[in-house]
Image (cartoon, rainbow, N blue to C red):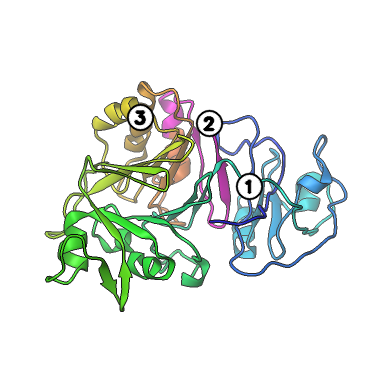
Amino acid sequence: MRFNKIFIVALIPLVLSIGITQSFIVSPVAFGAHQNINSPVQQMMDGVAAKDVVCKSGLALMIKSSGTAACVKPSSAEKLADQGWGTLEKGASMIEDEIVEVSMHEQNSDVTIEWLTWSFFRITTPDGKVILTNPWYTNPDSSITLDDIPEADIILVPTGHPDEVGNALEVAAKTNATIIASHELINLVWKDHNAGFRDPIIFNGTAIQSRSFQPGSTTTIDGITIRAVTALHGNYDTGGPAMGFFITMEDGYTIYFSGSTDLTLDMKLWGELFKPDAALLYLASGMNPRDVAVMVQLLSENNPNLKTVIPHHHRLDAPEGRTPADLGKAMMELGLKVELIDPQPGVIYTLSK
């Protein structure tokens, strides 16, 4: 997403699972015009300048006792409050409900990621490109609409299942994004039977560009390299193989998006070969968190880069024993030092090496 102003919450130590000494949690970027509100936050934590702690108009600043802060939508603020987050007054002895806009900053040089529920992530690269995974904005837990997806450059679709395809065609038609999916899904399902392999997908009269993949396929788009690997999952008769993706940004930062998959020893090899810095791992209600923790173990065994793990495909009201917290316990039992983010809708996390 290309924008000149970046809305940053706080220059404070980030202890919520990003594995770096200092970072930012970034507010959701507005979709449309923003307002200028010039009231300064008067009092902040020790060592943090007031001008550095800001939220965009219409977003609430929430703070944990640990010092972690986030600019969130009101609906997300209610959920965070239930998890021990406080307002300014309760969280850090600051004046309550002050919301101001950040002054001009240099363009972000890190990777940001936002979980939009289910397996739908919005990843923004250091150069401002937007990558979407499984863009199912109509899923039961989602609170966004197509209007909340103003830009996308690449859309990753790992299988042909409805919860993975989601609204990929609608989003691609609106944003002119390139879809990366299996050869079978693109050519046997989405295209007219008379279309050639190089012809675009036609959706409601709009031409959509795509790249047909199989496990092992690699492509580079605007400096971003996408590599497909196998995933152990069903995919209908015409969906082709299930896949996961390694996404390498312009600066070399690499994210593994597992798609929907079981545990496999291949992950040890992938960790050694591709050395992901972050992993987005499948935690559906049928998955044992212990198995997902072993995924982390395998990916990090010969890979010192892995610092961040974010689960996906879980519901907001995930059943007991299948929650991100349960994954965290399983990781602790294995002695893993990788940081775990329990993603919250409406919060944008900044990742860096």
- Residue span colored magenta: 330-353
Mark nearer the N terminus (3 vs 2): 3
Q: Position of residue 10 (x, y in %)?
A: 71, 44
Query: Which residue is depicted at the point 41% across and 67% down?
Result: 140
The residue beneath circle 1 is 107
Mark 2: few, some, or many residues within 10 Å (few <14, many ≥20)? some
Q: Are marks 3 and 1 in contact (CB under 8 Å)?
A: no
Q: What element carries label 2?
A: loop
Left or right, residue 340 beside residue 41:
left
Q: Is mark 1 on a helix, strand or loop?
A: loop
Mark nearer the N terminus (3 vs 1): 1
Left or right, residue 9 beside residue 251:
right
Looking at the rendered structure, the kind of residue marked 2 is Lys
- The numbered disc on residue 299 is 3
Q: Does the magenta stretch include residue 336?
A: yes
The residue beneath circle 2 is 353
Left or right, residue 57 beside residue 265:
right
Looking at the rendered structure, the kind of residue marked 3 is Leu
Mark 1: few, some, or many residues within 10 Å (few <14, many ≥20)? some
Work out whether 80 lies above or below 280. below
* Residue 210 or residue 76, whichever sits in front: 210
| Residue lying furthest right | 42
Q: Is mark 3 on a helix, strand or loop?
A: helix
